[in-house]
Structures are given as C-alpha cells and as structure tokens.
Image (cartoon, coloured by chain):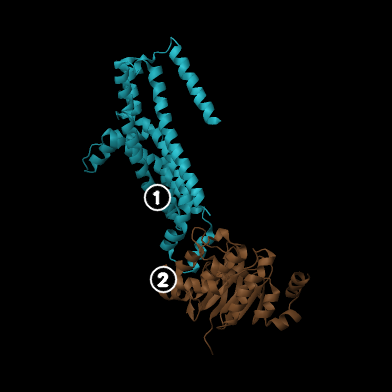
Chain colours: A cyan, B brown
Amino acid sequence: MKRFLVAAGLLLLLSGCSSSTAWGWYVIDPSTERGRINLQFLISGFGNTILLSVIAAVMSMFLGLIVALPGLSDQRGWRWANRVYVEFIRAIPLLPMLFWVFYGLPVVLKSMGIKVSIDPFWGAIITLALADSAFTAEIYRAGIQSIARGQREAAQTIGLNRAQTMRYVILPQAIRRILPPLANQFIYIVKMSAFASVIGMQELTRRANELVVTEYRPLEIYTFLILEYLVLVLVISQAVRWLENRMRVDER
Amino acid sequence: MQQAAIELVGVNKWFDSFHVLKDIDLTVAPGEKIVVCGPSGSGKSTMVRCINRLERHQSGTIRIDGIELEGEGRNVRTALAEIGMVFQQFNLFPHLSVLENLMLGPLKVRGKSRAEAEQIARRYLDRVHIPEQADKYPGQLSGGQQQRVAIARSLCMEPRIMLFDEPTSALDPEMISEVLDVMVELAAEGMTMIVVTHEMGFARKVADRMIFMDRGEIVESNPPGPFFSAPESERCRAFLDRILQH
C-alpha cells in the first residue's frame, strides 16, 4: 500500500511536470541528442558516488571497531579516550571537517615533514570515514554491551580467557545486532558523500551542479539528482531489509 | 589433616559502602556437600561468586586446594579450572547448539580434538539424561532441560568442585525435580558441592552441612539433622519457619 502511494505520487509529480510550461524537461529528454548527452553526464556520477561511499564505509567499519574497543575496557583511561574521540568527531559538521581535511591536513602533514597532496577523492573518503567512525563505534559498543553479563560469566567459568570469550561467545551474538544498524549507517554515508562536490569531486551532485551552470535548468536537473539518490538509497535499504530478515531467521 | 577443597578465612567484601560479606570463615572438605540458605541480600550468591572469582573479595583469604586466589598467576587459573558453576539463569550460549555449548570448553581451553570433545560432550549429555537434544539450540529446550545442559557444560571441564547459585529458582515447579535429580546423582559420585538453594527436601537428602547466612554473616553451620530440628539462632529459626510453613 505504502509503496503504491509513493509510486502514484511520483507519477503525478512527473506527469504534471512534463505538461507544464514552467518546466523544461528537454534538458534531459532522452529522445534528443542534447538530452542524451546531458543524461549520460549526470548518470556517470553514480560511479564515483558509489566508490566514495563504499570505500569510506569500509574504512569507517574498521576505524569504528578500533575506537569502540577502548570504550569497552575496564580501565577508566581507555573509556575516557573513547568518549573524547566520539564526542569530538560527532560535534564537527561535515562540511567544515571536509575543508579542514582537504585544505588544512596537507599543511599539518607538511610541517611534520610528510609531503603528500590530498586529492578530492581521498580527501572526501578520509572525511566521510572519520565523521562516520564515531557513529559506527557507538553501534559496535552498544551491540557488544547488549550481550548479557551472564554470557561473559559463563564463558569465564568454563575457562575461556578474555579474547576467546570475545571471539566465540560475545561477537557471534553481537554481530546480529550490529550488522543491521551498520548497514543503515551506509545510507547516511551515501547521502553525506554529496558534500564531496564542493571540493571538486566528480560525483552525482557535482555533475548536476556543473550541468546547471551550462544549461541553467536547476529545477529539472536537481529534481533528477534527487531521484538518482532516491534510487540508490532504495536499493540499499532493500538490501538492508533482506539482511535483517536473514538475521532474524538465524536467531533461535 | 586432609587438604581442604575450599577454604575462606576472614573474607570481607563491600559493594561501595554496603558490607556484603562480613568476616566469612568456611572450610569445605573434598567431597563435602554444603547447602547455603538465607534471605535474599544475605550474601549467599556473592560468597559463591567470590569462590570462583566472578567477584573479587577485598580482604581475607580464599584458597582452592591450598592455592590462594591472589593476583593473576598461572596457579590461580589452574585452581579456578577445578571449579564448575551453574547459574540461576542457565547462561547457555544461544548461538551454539547444545553439543557446541558443551564442546567449547574442551576444544578451546583443554585443547582437545573435535572427536574427543564431542565424545566428552555426549558422555555428559547422557549423564544429565538428554542425549537426544544434542543438535537443538538452547532456545528450543525447556528450562529444566536448559539447566541440565548447563550442568553438563560445567562437567565437561571435569571439575572437582561444583558451585550452584539458585539452580532451580528460575524454573517452573514441574521441572525442578529433573534438575535436582541430576544434582543428587552428582553428589552421590563424590563431587564437592556448594549449593545455594531453598529446596529443603534436596538439602535434607544431600547436605553434609547446612549454612544459614543473614546480613553478610554465616549465622549457623550445622549438619542437617540439628539444623532443621533445633536451629540455634532466632534469625535462623524464623527463616526456616517462613520457608517451611507450606
């Protein structure tokens, strides 16, 4: 029912658009040469958006685990380090962080004697991974802490050490609670990746911006851009739902 | 004199400012069965949990087979390996089958092969009378069956001492006896046992000694005969009256 409503709404919007004189869909009309070229230009942004998001998400998953572990420590100092990282990273808006990484970080590195230039691609990935890691770290921590204390105690009484308890008892149970929210987090990364356009990364949003400058049809082009993200996110959320269902089947 | 299996001397423990264990002295001989009872919050569970180090005591001495539980040395781990524990909430690993629950310790801690571990697991599953449940998952079993699996899981580590922390308190009444029966059999085989329970029928049958705890102290410690017929302290008498009146 819900899906039907959404589809009907979209259809109404699009059909209304095409008949209205205020809209100029010709810019991306696939029946014309110019429309085809423009469409191709816009759609070719998918590759980089997906690549950016996937690499950033994988990095964030590893970084998040490294950040989460001290948060689970008995020692106050480690837990404190985890809190500081999470609170600090979480407090920085993405755009300023992106500027800092892209324009500032090379200067910092240079002063430390490391000469690297950061291109828009890696600048965007580092920023996205960094910003997201605070959230993935919290997902890991919550997932691991949600496993009842009795599990740890039972593992201890049959002689498992800490690492074995984590590996054979806690993590296999926690992973079922961690994976769905982690996959959800991926949707945020995809949306956040639009910011990469401001440092010149050729992804979906950048392409749309550039086309708007030459064609001057912002309404149609940005509408199309939103639909592009919508399709991407719907595909991912469908995959997440499939994953969640599978996890539920496994839960006995 | 024979080496004590468990020895507590002047053990004290606080949870923040709350004094849970007050100067606990207790000596358990090898093969001895002790039943501990007392009102809730009296420190029974905490005492048992200190013996296998799920909780740390703050002063006094705890020795297992003469080895003092102090620091993190190898001998402390060897001593703890002698102790099995059964929890009120079973604490089976829900993501592993019954057989895998039992095999985990032998495989990862004792370094047995899969075949050996499975053999051990099946032997103890027989002992608790549910060999047919080997391939099920804990969530598919009744409470009584789960608790028997938990007992078998402890036994797979071949401990000389078994601690039971209210093993039947979370069970429906009709399942209590199947668990107690297994414990009675275990007792008959010479296992050293400390059992926290309010199942007084079981206590009369199995206990060599009854211990009554109240407000963090061992108030009374006697063989079941005199313990039930002529409790020495007023607190113990009042407690027994309350739990035995029906």
**In the depicted structure, whether residue A32 falls above or below residue A5:** above
Q: Which amino acid type is marked by label 2?
A: Ala
**Residue B171 drawn at (x, y percent):** 65, 64
Mark 1–mark 2 CB contact (< 8 Å)? no
- The label on residue B197 is none
A42 or B119, which lies in front?
A: B119
- The label on residue B115 is 2
Mark 1, chain letter? A
- The label on residue A65 is 1
Residue B230 visible in rendering:
no
SS for dot 2: helix
Please identify the quarter of the rendering in which residue A167 is found. Answer: bottom left
Decide: few, some or many residues near mark 2? Use Cα within 10 Å; few <14, some 14-19, many ≥20. Answer: few
Asked if residue B56 lies left or right of residue B234, the reply is: left
Please identify the quarter of the rendering in which residue B29 is found. Answer: bottom right
Question: How far apart are the alpha carbons under marks 1 and 2?
Answer: 35 Å
**In the depicted structure, whether residue A100 falls above or below residue A7:** below
Number of disc labels:
2
Decide: few, some or many residues near mark 1? Use Cα within 10 Å; few <14, some 14-19, many ≥20. Answer: some
**Residue A21 drawn at (x, y percent):** 43, 9
